[in-house]
Image (cartoon, rainbow, N blue to C red):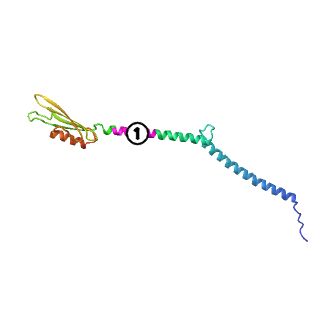
Amino acid sequence: MEPFLSPIPPVTILLVGTIALTLILLFVVILQSVRISRLRKSINRLMTGTGGANLEEGLHRLLDQVDEVKKLQNDQQFTLNRLSQRIAAQCGKVAVIRYNAFGDVGSDLSFSLAMLDDAQNGVVITSIFGREESRVYAKPIEAGTSTYHLSEEEQAAIKKAMTSHSAV
């Protein structure tokens, strides 16, 4: 004798299949909702600052801002170059040589002062101190030399200034 198995009605199989399919679809819907939520957050972050405008307008505005920054950077580079040229033309190389011009005067009261720019142009100023009188001379310097006769002290001051990087 065979055990008695009651046949499962087709309606029950259909009901169980429908419930299983519904649970699977519910899981897929929840998964898609999470993905949509992430995309929405990403889009909101991307659209921040556009004031409701479309993304293309926002990108155009950003490109315009980049162009303005580039123009400002070019202007600043031009100014920096001009300032560098002006600094190079300043008499930033200075040297002083003190000496005793006359043996009868007791100390080094005479001096030669050289002031040069980066191109070795500038001036040498010499003060010769004596008991009875003092004299001051200024001689132009171009490319490290002068059209005027230079004393040993003036030449030494110019040489010292040419090798210096700061005021003495």
x and y percentages locating residue 137 in the rendered image:
17, 32
Judge by depth and name the residue closer to the eye, 92 or 81.
81
Q: Kindly indicate the quadrant of the structure image that contains residue 150.
A: top left
Q: Quadrant of the C terminus?
A: top left
Magenta stretch, residue numbers: 72-85
| Residue pictured at 54% horizontal, 42% vertical | 63
Judge by depth and name the residue closer to the eye, 103 or 59.
59
Q: Residue furthest bottom?
A: 1
Q: Which residue is mark 1?
A: 78
Q: Residue furthest left?
A: 104
In the image, residue 29 sits, relative to residue 88, either above or below, namely below
x and y percentages locating residue 145 in the rendered image:
21, 41
Q: Residue furthest right?
A: 1
| Residue pictured at 12% horizontal, 28% vertical | 133
| Residue pictured at 59% horizontal, 40% vertical | 58
x and y percentages locating residue 155 in the rendered image:
18, 41
Judge by depth and name the residue closer to the eye, 15 or 71.
71
Residue 37 is left or right of residue 156, and the answer is: right
Residue 77 is left or right of residue 120, and the answer is: right
Q: Kindly indicate the quadrant of the structure image that contains residue 166.
A: top left
Residue 39 is left or right of residue 114, and the answer is: right
Residue 58 colored in magenta in the image: no
Q: Residue furthest front?
A: 147
Judged from the image, the secondary structure of the residue bearing numbered disc 1 is helix
Residue 82 is left or right of residue 42, and the answer is: left
Q: Quadrant of the N terminus?
A: bottom right
